[in-house]
Amino acid sequence: LDEEAMREAARRLDRLTKPPGSLGRLEELAVQLAGITGDADLKPMAKAIVVMAADHGVCEEGVSAFPQEVTRQMVHNFLAGGAAINVLARQTGAEVVCVDIGVKGELEDDRLISRKVRQGTANMAREAAMSREEAERAIEIGIELAEILAGKGIRLFATGEMGIGNTTPSAAVLSVLSDVDAEDAVGRGTGIDDAGMKRKQATIRKAIALNVPDASDAIDVLAKVGGLELAGLAGLVLGAAANRRPVVIDGFISTVAALAACRIAPAAKEYLIPSHLSEEKGHRVALKELGLEPMLSLKMRLGEGSGAVLAFPLIDAAGNVLREMATFDSAGVSRG
Amino acid sequence: LDEEAMREAARRLDRLTKPPGSLGRLEELAVQLAGITGDADLKPMAKAIVVMAADHGVCEEGVSAFPQEVTRQMVHNFLAGGAAINVLARQTGAEVVCVDIGVKGELEDDRLISRKVRQGTANMAREAAMSREEAERAIEIGIELAEILAGKGIRLFATGEMGIGNTTPSAAVLSVLSDVDAEDAVGRGTGIDDAGMKRKQATIRKAIALNVPDASDAIDVLAKVGGLELAGLAGLVLGAAANRRPVVIDGFISTVAALAACRIAPAAKEYLIPSHLSEEKGHRVALKELGLEPMLSLKMRLGEGSGAVLAFPLIDAAGNVLREMATFDSAGVSRG
C-alpha cells in the first residue's frame, strides 16, 4: 500500500469538522482506499460486481434445498436484470458482470461472459471436484477478468456468486484451510432442514477423508473439495490486488474464496473490504480467519454479491467525506 | 400498523426469486414500511434528516472535550453544507433540516428553522435543566415540525442533533429511564479523557440526586436532567408516528430521545428504524431498552444524524427489492 497517500488521507481527515476519528470505519476506509489506489483524493469509483456461476456435482448427495437447474435459471435472471443483485446494483450505479465459469448445460447470451472450465464439478464425496489444472484455469480466469475490467475503468470490485450447493464446498474449503470441524463450517445454505444439515456435514467429512486436500496448498484444496466459482473468485481477488483495486467481499462463499486467495498471496488481504455478516454459520469463522470485521448486520443469506453491493454506499461515503467536508479553519469552528 | 398491507408485502416477498427470508432485515424493513405507510407498493420516499441544535448549561462542569461555542459554529457549518451530515445527506438525496431549539446566542439565517425555547439549558448539577413547560414546548415543536414536513411530502424522517455536552444529559435521562448506573450510561462523547469521564459520571449522579426526576414520567426526566434537542427529537418521533411516517434513529442521543418518546407513547416504537451501533457506551443499553438491533457497525460517534442517513440506502433497497425483483413465475425459476 502507498503509505504516503495513507498519511495524506489521515492528515486531511483530522482537519475536517468532526472530533478526530469520530467517523470510525469510514475514516479507516478512506485511509485504506488511499493506500490501495495511491490517491488521497479518493475520486468517485466506477464499480462492478462480478457474479461467477458454476454447478456442483456434490448436489447428488442431497445437500441443497433447491434443484441444480436453478443455477442456470438464475443466470438467465441475472442477465434479464430481475435478481436481487441486479436491483441492488442498479440502486448504487454498479455494473453486474455475470460469468459462466462452470454451469451445467449450455448458456447462450451475448451479455454473459462465457468462460466455462467444465460442466460443473464432479461429486467430491466420490472423487476430486476437479483437477489441479482446472482449478488453476479458473483462478486465471478470475485474474484475467479483473485485469480486463480494470482496463475498462472499473475501480472498485465486488465478489458475487451463484451455484446451487455451493455452501457445501465452501464449508469444506474453510474446514481444511482453517482446521475447523465441518459442524462449525456448515450452515443451512438456501434453507435446508436438520436432516439435510447432518447430510451436509457427513458429506464434507467424507470428501475431505477421501481426497486428503493439502491445507498448506490452497489450490489443492480448491481443486479437491472446492468449486469453480470459488476458484474464479479467488482469482478475481488476486487480480484486483494486482491491479491496485479494492475488492468488496460478500458473504460466506465469497469470504472463503478470499481466504483461499490470501493463502495463495497473503498481500491480497490489504485490498479486501468486508461488507455484511451473513446468517450462514461459517461466515463468522471465515471473517475471523481473515481478520475482517463486517460493517453490515442484515441477517442476509442470499449470496449473489447482495451484501457486498449494499456496502458500496459506505465506501462512496468515505470518499465523499474526505473530498467534501469543511475543515475547522474553512468553517471557523473551534477545536477541542 | 396496517396488518393487511404487511401481509400483502410478505406475500409478494415470498414470490420473488430468492430463498424465502434470505434478504433478512431488508425483508423485515419492507414489511414494517408497508405496515407504517399502509402501502405495500413501497414507493420511493422523500427523506429529511432533522438536526436539532441546543446548548447545555452542564458544560460548566467540564464534561465535554469541545468548547460550548462549537454548537453555534456547527449550526453555521450545517447551513453552509460543510458538515459530515450534509455530505452524507447529499449522497443519499435527503434534505437536512436544521433547527435551533435552544442554542446559546443569536443565530440569523433564512435557512435555519428558528424555534429557540431558551438560550440553552440551566446547569442540571445545580438546578433543573429546564421547566416542565419548556420541555413540553420543545416536544410540541418536534411534533409540529414532523407535521409540517410530512405535509410538504417528506415520507421518511431521520433524527440528528448538535449540542456540545449533550452526551451528559442523554446519559442522565437513560440512567433514570432504564435504571442503570451512570457508569454504564456514560461514554467519551467527542473524546473526553479518563478524568473527564469520572467528572461526567459524578455530575450525572449529582444532577439526579438533586433534581429527583420521576422515572415514570419521561417529560419530568427530560425537563430536569435532559436537553432541549432531546425533548425536540422525542417530539419529532411522536409526530412522525402520528403522521404514519417511519423515523430512522441515529446514535446515542437520538436513541435516548426515542426512548423518552416511547415512554410517553409506547405505540411510537413500531415506527422506529434503527441505524448504526455507536461507539458511545450507553448506546447499546438504550437500543436494548427499545428492542432495536442496529444494521450498521461503523464505530462512529459523531452524531448529527450521520449514522441514520447511512441507513437510508438500506431502506431504499427494501423498497426496490419489493418493487423490482422478478418472481419465480415471471423468471421461470424452479422453487426449492
Image (cartoon, coloured by chain):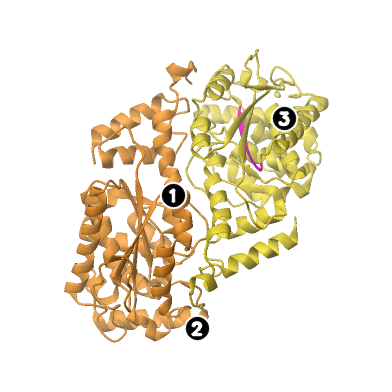
Chain colours: A yellow, B orange
Q: Outermost residue, left direction?
A: B133
Q: Which residue is mark 1?
A: B311
3 or 2: mark nearer the eye: 2
- Marks 2 and 1 sit apart, C-alpha to C-alpha, by 34 Å
Relative to the observer, which residue lies in front, B318 or A156? A156
State the separation of the CA atoms marked 3 and 2: 56 Å
Whether A115 is among the magenta residues is: no
In the rendered structure, which amino acid carries the disc numbered 3? Val
Give the label on residue B322, or none.
none
Q: Give the quarter of the figure containing the N terminus of chain A.
A: bottom right
- Estimate how packed mark 1 is, as few (under 14), some (14 to 19) or many (20 or more) residues with alpha carbons within 10 Å: many
Q: Are marks 3 and 1 on the same chain?
A: no
Q: Chain of mark 3?
A: A
Closer to viewer: mark 3 or mark 1: 1
Residue B79 position (above or below residue A72): below
Under mark 1, the amino acid is Ala
